[in-house]
Image: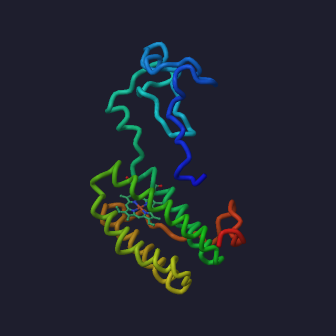
């Protein structure tokens, strides 16, 4: 059976099905007494029907907004992805380097949503700076990657300056990340 034809797992098992949800109806999920028992279904990514904490407190939009990560929370993660991307490329582990780059871009796209005032700069950085860097990764051209990577650091720090955070100067750590084996994996292609 081709993966396209495989039946898609329902977000919630139908009422009367087997397993933990057996006999549960949609109405059950909306009963107040059930709300604090709702959990994200990590298999399907289905969020609970209501934004209720474990103690039964229903969160307001303002509270939900306050939970969204801003740049001060996302940037350190971006820095770690960028660090790993460099040393993976230097080890010719192109699959890993490309993956780190993709994850880093996702964090920038998340920042666009949570902090819209940076949209223009983030978009410019994604296309003008990370675009050529990604092309070098795709071509597995380390010299071009290295050149573009250095330019990307300078550009990032220019943006910090622009946003009056000139005291934030990111630098590539001298050492490769200690938590990853950077050796190219034979099955990675
Ligand atoms: C690969 C590129 C980048 C890296 C590695 C990087 C790294 C960092 C780091 C490590 C911080 C400090 C976070 C902390 O500990 O508080 C930071 C903060 C910040 N970055 Fe970046 N950055 C990059 C690109 C950018 C770009 C393109 C912008 C443009 C909008 C930007 C805007 C900011 C701002 C505004 C802050 C301050 C956040 C705050 O405190 O509200 N960065 N960055």
Q: Position of residue 126 (x, y in %)?
A: 37, 68
Quadrant hosting ligand 1: bottom left
Q: Position of residue 54 (x, y in %)?
A: 51, 23
The structure residue drawn at horizontal position 29% and vertical position 52%, both measured from the top left corner, is 116
Q: Report the label total.
A: 0
Displayed quadrant of residue 121: bottom left
Choose between 165 and 39: the one closer to the eye. 39
| The C terminus lies in quadrant | bottom right
**Colouring of the image:** rainbow
Picture coordinates of residue 111, whole percent (x, y): 38, 53
Q: Residue at x 43, y 20 (%)?
A: 57
Q: Where residue 169 sits: x, y (%)?
A: 45, 67
Q: In this orientation, which residue lies closer to the viewer: 45 or 153?
A: 45
Q: Quadrant of residue 180?
A: bottom right
* 14 to the left or right of 123: right
Instruction: Reply above or below: 154 against 142.
Output: above
Left or right of residue 149: residue 128: left
Q: Is residue 93 above or below residue 67?
A: below
The residue positioned 46% from the left and 34% from the top of the image is: 47
């Amino acid at each position: 059976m081709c993966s396209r034809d495989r039946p898609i797992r329902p977000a919630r098992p139908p009422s009367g099905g087997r397993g933990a949800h057996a006999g549960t109806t949609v109405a059950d999920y909306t009963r107040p007494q059930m709300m604090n028992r709702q959990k994200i279904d990590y298999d399907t990514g289905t969020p609970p029907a209501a934004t209720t904490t474990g103690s039964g407190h229903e969160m307001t939009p303002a509270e939900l907004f306050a939970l969204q990560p801003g740049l001060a929370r996302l940037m350190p993660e971006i820095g770690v992805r960028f660090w790993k991307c460099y040393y993976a490329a230097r080890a010719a582990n192109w699959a890993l380097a490309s993956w780190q780059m993709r994850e880093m871009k996702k964090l920038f796209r998340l920042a666009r949503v949570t902090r819209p005032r940076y949209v223009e700069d983030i978009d410019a950085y994604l296309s003008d700076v990370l675009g050529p860097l990604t092309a070098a990764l795709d071509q597995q051209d380390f010299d071009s990657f290295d050149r573009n990577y250095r330019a990307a650091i300078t550009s990032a720090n220019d943006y910090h300056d622009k946003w009056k955070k000139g005291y934030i100067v990111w630098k590539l750590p001298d050492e490769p990340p200690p938590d990853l084996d950077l050796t190219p994996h034979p099955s990675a292609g």
